[in-house]
Image (spheres, grey):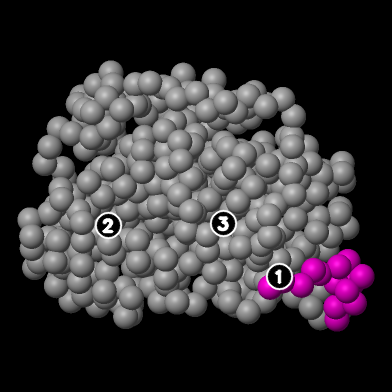
């Protein structure tokens, strides 16, 4: 009798979880993958689903995490700070056909476009190390640093020592890291920092209550953010370790101007959500508000009616050039928020590209809407190019990336395999006007599960530079054709087909 009751309860559990998966509003491929796992391994599959599969984007468990930050911000904000972060007047300076994208990404309390920004596009790890080290040494008030991976190698320890030095000098250093991504690093590594006065927050802490940990373990903080004195910001694809500083090809930004406020807003959100604390009123972390620098909207003369598609200058990557007075929109995304806004932005950009759109990404496991957008754009005559590493750094991602090659090649997408140094850049450039540099990969994890942040730059000069960088990287690529890809062995096709079933879960 007892065994019969257990069997009935077990069947009800499997059926109930299956129904929950079916009625979920998420990607159909992701749902199918979970149903397949549960069908093959029912009990283990259910446990894994509760840990890694539930879509918490609309769930109260996740939504409550922001309440502490929202309560503090809403209580302490000022009209000037709200105008700086969420005002829409600057959108009028964007070329008309791109304004809907800016409005799309500024809904639901996402930061809006800001004017008056200077930045350097960093394509060399050595250059980032040089600039970041100098800015840390010159900090006078605060250093806020948030990284998915902060290593324990030569370059990382040098940055760590600089942070400790500044903390001993009395500078407020706040250090937030994704605990699971840095799990092999000894706790003594961070204890040294704490002794020096660095404030540290683990974004995902395995020592939290087991139920809390289970529903958060699959949601990683993948951002790379530095804010120094509220005036200088860094963001993009580069983490802190020797791979990025010495070996890999990646793209990053150093920003000054009003867009730094959006980086500060994003950092403080993560910091307070991770149970960190602040010691001043919220508005004091935004010096551009107190200085009144954001009030005037700078007209940039960018009302251009059509796509120019100029030929880029001779290829060059490490230009060390500061681009001035640009329109920038920093867009943070996370599972706590109601919409996968970065995925929507990619879909919009692809669908509205008129002449070309070029992508770089280390991991290419696109959700179905993004995949369909790429195919439809290429089939309609848009020059769609995708650059990925020839060999992924992750053994599972190698066949996962390749599982989509046949489909995009048949649609006319041009596929370039980066040889030599591993390419970790997450960028795109479109129609000599729109550029994006960020932390998000073209995969379901970045678009739906991770905490990410991308920058969107509305500017012709920047787009031409980014296009030139892409063309420079092409010199270290080989183009994969459909004819070549069709000759791959049968067992490779089989592995790729099987991996593709589970690709949405990677």
Name the one closer to the observer, 54 or 176. Answer: 176
Q: Is 411 on the left-hand or right-hand side of 466?
A: right
Location of mark 3 (residue): 426
Residue for point 58% across, 74% down: 422
Residue for point 68% across, 73% down: 476
Location of mark 1 (residue): 475
Q: What span is colored magenta in the figure?
A: 476-489
Q: Which mark is residue 135?
A: 2
Residue 63 visible? The answer is no
Name the one closer to the observer, 78 or 365. Answer: 78
The answer to which image quadrant residue 491 occupies is bottom right
Residue for point 75% across, 55% down: 385
Q: Quadrant of the C terminus?
A: bottom right
> How far is disc 2 from disc 3 in space, using C-alphas?
24 Å
Q: Residues within 10 Å of mark 2 (few under 14, many from 20)?
A: some
Q: Residues within 10 Å of mark 3 (few under 14, many from 20)?
A: many
């Amino acid at each position: 009798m007892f065994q019969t009751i257990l069997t009935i309860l077990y069947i009800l559990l499997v059926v109930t979880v299956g129904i929950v998966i079916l009625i979920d509003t998420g990607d159909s491929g992701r749902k199918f993958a979970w149903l397949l796992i549960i069908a093959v391994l029912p009990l283990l599959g259910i446990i894994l689903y509760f840990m890694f599969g539930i879509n918490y984007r609309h769930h109260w468990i996740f939504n409550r995490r922001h309440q502490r930050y929202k309560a503090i911000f809403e209580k302490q904000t000022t009209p000037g700070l709200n105008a700086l972060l969420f005002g829409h007047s600057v959108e009028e300076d964007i070329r008309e056909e791109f304004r809907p994208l800016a409005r799309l990404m500024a809904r639901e309390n996402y930061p809006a476009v800001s004017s008056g920004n200077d930045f350097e596009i960093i394509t060399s790890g050595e250059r980032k190390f040089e600039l970041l080290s100098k800015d840390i040494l010159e900090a006078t008030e605060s250093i806020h640093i948030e990284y998915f991976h902060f290593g324990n190698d030569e370059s990382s320890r040098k940055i760590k020592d600089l942070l400790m030095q500044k903390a001993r000098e009395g500078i407020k250093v706040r250090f937030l890291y994704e605990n699971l991504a840095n799990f092999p690093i000894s706790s003594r590594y961070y204890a040294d920092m704490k002794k020096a006065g660095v404030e540290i927050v683990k974004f995902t802490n395995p020592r939290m209550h087991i139920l809390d940990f289970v529903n958060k373990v699959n949601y990683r903080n993948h951002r790379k953010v530095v804010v120094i004195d509220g005036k200088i910001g860094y963001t993009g694809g580069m983490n802190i370790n020797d791979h990025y500083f010495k070996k890999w090809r990646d793209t990053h930004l150093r920003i000054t101007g009003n867009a730094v406020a959006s980086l500060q807003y994003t950092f403080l959100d993560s910091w307070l959500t991770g149970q960190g604390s602040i010691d001043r009123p919220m508005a004091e972390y935004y010096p551009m508000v107190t200085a009144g620098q954001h009030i005037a909207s700078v007209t940039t003369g960018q009302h251009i009616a059509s796509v120019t598609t100029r030929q880029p200058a001779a290829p060059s990557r490490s230009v060390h050039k500061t681009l001035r007075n640009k329109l920038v929109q920093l867009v943070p995304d996370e599972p706590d928020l109601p919409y996968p806004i970065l995925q929507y932005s990619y879909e919009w950009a692809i669908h509205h590209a008129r002449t070309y759109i070029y992508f770089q990404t280390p991991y290419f496991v696109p959700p179905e809407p993004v995949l369909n957008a790429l195919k439809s754009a290429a089939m309609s005559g848009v020059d769609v190019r995708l650059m990925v590493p020839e060999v992924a750094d992750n053994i599972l991602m190698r066949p996962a990336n390749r599982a989509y090659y046949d489909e995009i090649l048949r649609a006319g997408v041009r596929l370039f395999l980066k040889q030599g140094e591993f390419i970790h850049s997450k960028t795109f450039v479109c129609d000599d006007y729109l550029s994006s540099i960020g932390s998000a990969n073209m995969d379901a994890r970045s678009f739906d599960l991770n905490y990410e942040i991308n920058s969107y730059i509305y500017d012709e000069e920047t787009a031409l530079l980014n296009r030139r960088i892409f063309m420079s990287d092409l010199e270290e690529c080989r183009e994969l054709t459909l004819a070549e890809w069709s000759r791959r062995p049968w067992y490779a096709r089989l592995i790729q087909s099987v991996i593709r079933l589970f690709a949405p879960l990677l």
